[in-house]
C-alpha cells in the first residue's frame, strides 16, 4: 500500500477562536494505491476525502477541524476491513 496525500489544510484552534469561520474550511484528501506484492499489479486506488466546513469549525471552536485525522483513519480502517479480509 502506498498512501499519497493530495491535499491537507487544517485551520488551527487559535485561528478558529479569533476569526471563527473566516479561517475557511479544513480538508484532507488522500489516495491509497494498493499493490499486489507478488505481481506488482495495482489492485485498487481508493481516494478518501473529508472536510470540516468553516461554520462548523467556527461553532465548535476548531473541534471539527481537529477530528479530521480521526475520521480519515476510521474510514480507511472500515474500507480495508470491508474489502480485504
Image (tube, rainbow, N blue to C red):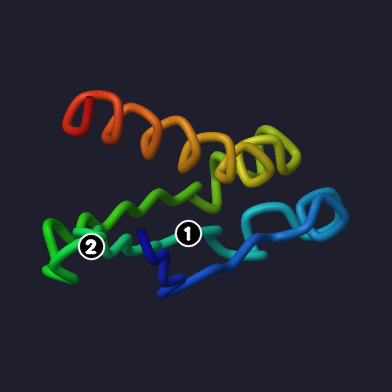
- Which badge, 2 or 1, comes first in the chain's sequence? 1
Residue 80 as seen in the image, left or right of residue 77 = left
Closer-to-camera residue (32/85): 85
Give coordinates of residue 69: x percent, y percent. Answer: 58, 45
Find the distance from the CA under tag 2 to the CA under tag 1. Answer: 23 Å
* Mark 1, residue position: 28
Q: Residue 82 falls in which quadrant of the image?
A: top left
Q: Residue 30 falls in which quadrant of the image?
A: bottom left
Closer-to-camera residue (43/77): 43
Residue neighbourhood size for the residue with mark 1, other residues' Cα within 10 Å, grouped as few (<14), some (14–19), many (≥20): many
Q: Residue 74 falls in which quadrant of the image?
A: top left
Residue in the picture at 50% in, 38% down = 73
Residue 41 as seen in the image, left or right of residue 85 = left
Q: Nearer the viewer, mark 2 or mark 1?
A: 2
Residue in the picture at 62% in, 55% down = 21
Label 2 SS: strand
Residue in the picture at 21% in, 55% down = 46
* Mark 2, residue position: 35
Give coordinates of residue 4: x percent, y percent. Answer: 41, 71
Closer-to-camera residue (73/44): 44
Amino acid at each position: 500500500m502506498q498512501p499519497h496525500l493530495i491535499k491537507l489544510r487544517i485551520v488551527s484552534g487559535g485561528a478558529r477562536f479569533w476569526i471563527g469561520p473566516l479561517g475557511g474550511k479544513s480538508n484532507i484528501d488522500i489516495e491509497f494505491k494498493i499493490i499486489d506484492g507478488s505481481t506488482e499489479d495495482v489492485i485498487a486506488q481508493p481516494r478518501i476525502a473529508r472536510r470540516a466546513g468553516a461554520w462548523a469549525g467556527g461553532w465548535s471552536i476548531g473541534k471539527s477541524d481537529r477530528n479530521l485525522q480521526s475520521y480519515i483513519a476510521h474510514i480507511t480502517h472500515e474500507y480495508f476491513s470491508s474489502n480485504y479480509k
